[in-house]
Amino acid sequence: MPTRAPFAVWRETARRAVGHAVPPALIDWSGDGGLFAGAELPKEAGSHVPRVPAAFLDLAQTVIWHSAPERFARLYEALWRLDRCVGDPLSPADPLGQTLRLMEKSVRRDIHKMHAFLRFRELPRQARRRRFAAWFEPQHNILEPAVPFFQSRFSDTDWMIATPGLSAHCEGGELTYREGSAPPDLPPDASEALWGIYFENIFNPARIKLGAMRSEMPRKYWKNLPETRLIPDMLAKAEGRVRQMHSAGASAPRPGAERVSERYRSGMPSAEELPRTLADAGVAAAQCRLCGLCEKATQTVWGEGAGDAALMIVGEQPGDVEDLAGRPFVGPAGQLLRAELTKAAIDPARLWLTNAVKHFKFEPRGKRRLHQNPNRTEIEACRWWLQRELALVRPKLVLALGASAAFALTGKVGALSGRRGVIEIGFHGGPIMISWHPSYILRLPDPQHRAEILAQMARDLSRAAEQSFGETA
């Protein structure tokens, strides 16, 4: 088999051998011949054309780069068995399948390590393009399948990657392969010092896991990595650095900080203690500091709609979209609610739409903000604003959507399945109808169940409108 592009040659040879019904035991894939070498394989294709699943071709195109000499024979044995429907050589439960899967995994891991641990060094420039070179010692013959990664990222430079078995050269955008070589004499790279400083600064001595570190960065790659020479010293100093971090963790505020904070807060506009209008209450709620949710949320999401609405709909809390827009029920759940209101011929402008908690509670997860339910303390802290809305709007009926809204309005906890559609008396002395929150409906995985729950919420909306407006809105 050739050193470069061996799969095409192996595939053509294997198809010809299967076509002539040559069993695996009669093929010498090493090509060494010897005293007992058999007859040559016929030059022309056989009458039988083997057919194998695409998964085998995917597997073979990876295993072919393995360094084990028996890989060609193993692959032909699998092809022979697949063609004759003898067991499942692609299954990890099959001894041959297990061997091939381990070989595939080893090759993929070697490619990943080359992408992660190869370090280029810049060479003196001889033309307009910058030149780089690197040395790497892979476990398998993975230079060819690994090179496209570098080709796509360094298309504007000339570079060379040398390995013991093969070397890749990219000059002027043209990629060529040459024989392998010994480690080239590469010049020192000034950027390695900066890389070392960066590596030292991202090293967290309080989270050392030597086993995981050696698993991700095996020692055999260390000798060619500039940052690894720093590791022994960093490990030796880790314990001392952890003590420094502990001692520096608790620090008292500098003298006078409290007075500075007081002056800052005193300079902020103060809200009216008991707002007399919904507009004043909205302005005051924007400065709310009754709980810690205001520290992370973008803004207070106050209610909106008719100030004298006969029906008030109370959700649980703003979501990510509402937090950014500053309006209730404009996210995915709100869009579902507004769609059901439209189907029921209920004009949202005749309602007061608000939430039990006025700030978005979330947990950062990368670039996403994952919704978190408000706890009892946060709901009770925000109840003051909800009571102010109830006192100013004075609705005939309040429709509570979800468990948090039901607790905020009634102080009772319990499964919604037994309370939905039932009228309860709220803290303000008025009637409260409880229904499902649209976000709960959106999360239901079963379409039929989701349709049933949505139909229940739609019926609750119609009943609430009928009782509030005296007729279907």
Image (spheres, rainbow, N blue to C red):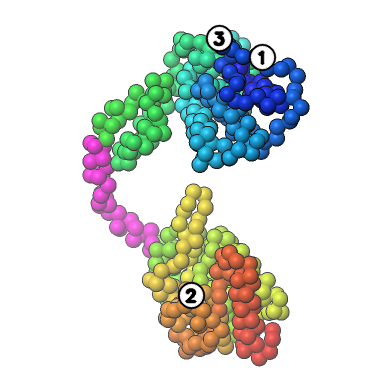
Q: Whole-Å distance between the Cαs marked 3 and 2? A: 81 Å
State the extent of the magenta-drawn residues as a range: 239-266
| Spatial separation of the CA atoms under disc 1 and disc 2 | 79 Å
* Left or right: 423, with 190 as reference point: right
Give the camera-side residue of 270 and 172.
Answer: 172
Name which residue lies at 67% across and 74% down: 340
Q: Position of residue 398 (x, y in %)?
A: 55, 83
| Residue type beneath disc 1 | Glu
What's the amino acid at mark 3?
Gly
Secondary structure of the residue carrying numbered label 2: helix
First in residue order: circle 3 vs circle 1: 3
In this rendered view, identify the residue nearer to me: 287 or 407: 407
- Distance CA(mark 3)–CA(mark 1): 13 Å
> What residue did someone put label 1 on?
40
Q: Name the residue tied to disc 2.
A: 403
**Mark 2 packing: few (<14 Cα in 10 Å), some, or many (20+)?**
many
The image's mark for residue 34 is 3
Q: Is residue 23 left or right of residue 416?
A: right
> Where does the image place residue 88, in percent across and percent down from the top left?
58, 40
Residue 328 sits inside the magenta stretch: no
Q: Is residue 272 visible?
A: no
